[in-house]
Amino acid sequence: MRLKLLALPLVGVAIAGALGLAGQGVAQTAPAAAPPAFLQCKVCHATTANAPRGLGPNLFGVVGAQAGKRPGFTYSPALTNSNLRWDRANLEAFITNPRTKVPGNRMAYAGMANPAQRKAVLDYLQTLK
C-alpha cells in the first residue's frame, strides 16, 4: 500500500511534464494583492502582463520604464517629452499630483494626498514584473 501512495506524486510530475508545466510548480508565488487605495487606479489601468490597456496604459512593469514610451498607448505630448523614468520618486510625485509633476498630461486624476496610501500603491506597483 505504501508503494502506491508514493507513486501518486510521480504520476502528477509526469502529467505536468507532458503538459509542459514542468518548472511551473506549486512553489510559484501568487501576485501581490492590490491595496484598497489602488481601486481608484484600477478603474483605468490593467496590471497583468499582456492585458489590454484600459483608459490608461497597462501598469505591468511600469517601475523603471521610460515615461510615455511604452507601446500600446497614445500618451500626451507632455508625458512623451517629459524624459522621466518611472523610478519610485517620480512615480510618487506623479501619483501625488499628476498635473504638477507633468503639466499638460492627460491623466484625469487629481492625485493621492494620503502618504500611506501612496506608499501602498507604490509598493504594489513594484511587484508588477
Image: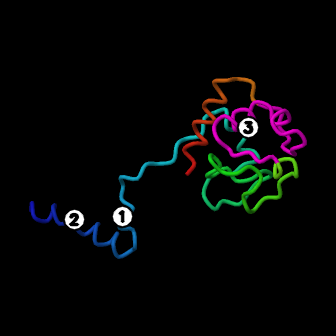
Q: Is residue 40 left or right of residue 11?
A: right
The verdict on residue 75 being magenta is no
Q: Quadrant of residue 16?
A: bottom left
The verdict on residue 102 being magenta is yes
Position of residue 27 relative to residue 93, above or below, is below
**What residue is at 33 percent from the left and 72 percent from the top?**
17
Q: Is residue 77 left or right of residue 5?
A: right
Q: Amino acid at mark 1?
A: Gly
* Disc sitting over residue 40 in the figure: 3
Q: Between label 2 and label 1, give the one nearer the viewer.
A: 1
Q: Which of pointers 2 and 1 lies earlier in the amino acid sequence?
A: 2
| Outermost residue toward the right in this view | 104
Q: Is residue 77 left or right of residue 127?
A: right
Which secondary structure lies at badge 3? Answer: helix
Percent x, y of residue 48? 61, 54
Q: Between label 2 and label 3, give the one nearer the viewer.
A: 3
Percent x, y of residue 71? 73, 62
* Disc sitting over residue 10 in the figure: none
* Disc sitting over residue 8 in the figure: 2
Q: Amino acid at mark 3?
A: Gln
Q: CA distance from mark 2 to mark 3?
A: 46 Å
Which secondary structure lies at badge 2? Answer: helix
Q: Amino acid at mark 2?
A: Leu
Residue segment shown in magenta: 82-111
